Amino acid sequence: FFFEADSFLRFRDACAAAGIKAPITPGILPVTNWGRARSFAERCGTPISQATMTGFDRAEREDRAELYALTHCADLCDTLVSEGVDALHFYTLNRPELTLQVCRALGLVPPA
């Protein structure tokens, strides 16, 4: 669970350098509730960059949280795929709508 692609990519590269050859699939959490996601990250010790915190906080203040969450998640996934990641695991938490929108934005499923 991470908010920045570089976090996963560093982990993947460190595993490869250590000789681990098993595939490592990143777990993606589309943010449907920033307050809960931030609290979960804090409890797990997951770092959140200042840019990510500022972006989500500002989007909430400006009533653009859903759009920002979609953009953030799609950008994250696009970066991972462009860096050679061949599979993504989405944590939908029984709320698949945002994940479907992300997959559409990535061109993985046809538009509605």
Image: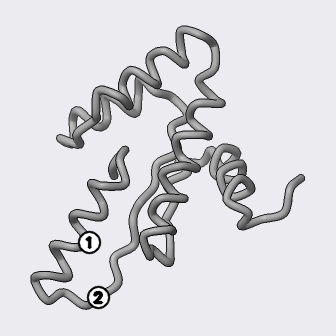
**Residue 97, percent across and down?**
70, 45
**Residue 83, placed above or below residue 52:** below
Question: Which residue is found at the position 53% from the left and 46% from the top?
Answer: 73
Q: Residue at x 50, y 78 (%)?
A: 86
Which label was assigned to residue 105? Answer: none
Determine the residue positioned at 26% across, 71% down.
12
Precedes in sequence: disc 1 or disc 2: 1
Against 55, is 102 above or below?
below
Q: Crowdedness of circle 1 by 10 Å Cα count: few (<14), some, many (20+)?
A: some
Q: Quadrant of residue 5?
A: bottom left
Residue 1 shown left or right of residue 107 in the figure:
left
Mark 1 = which residue? 12
Q: Is residue 69 above or below residue 89?
A: above
Q: Which residue is mark 2?
A: 22
Q: What secondary structure is marked by label 2?
A: loop
User: Which element carries disc 1, helix, strand or loop?
Assistant: helix
Q: Residue furthest top?
A: 61
Question: Horizontal and vertical percent for residue 80?
Answer: 45, 63
- Looking at the rendered structure, the kind of residue marked 2 is Ala
Q: Is residue 17 left or right of residue 101?
A: left
Going by the picture, which residue comes out furthest to the front? 82
Residue nearest the observer in this picture, 107 or 46:
107
Residue depicted at x 14% and y 89% = 19
Q: Total marks drawn?
A: 2
Please indicate whether residue 67 sits to the left or right of residue 52 in the image.
Answer: right
The kind of residue tagged 1 is Arg
Q: Residues within 10 Å of mark 2 (few under 14, many from 20)?
A: few
Q: Who is closer to the viewer here, 100 or 5?
A: 5
Q: Quadrant of residue 107?
A: bottom right
Identify whether 93 is placed above or below 48: below
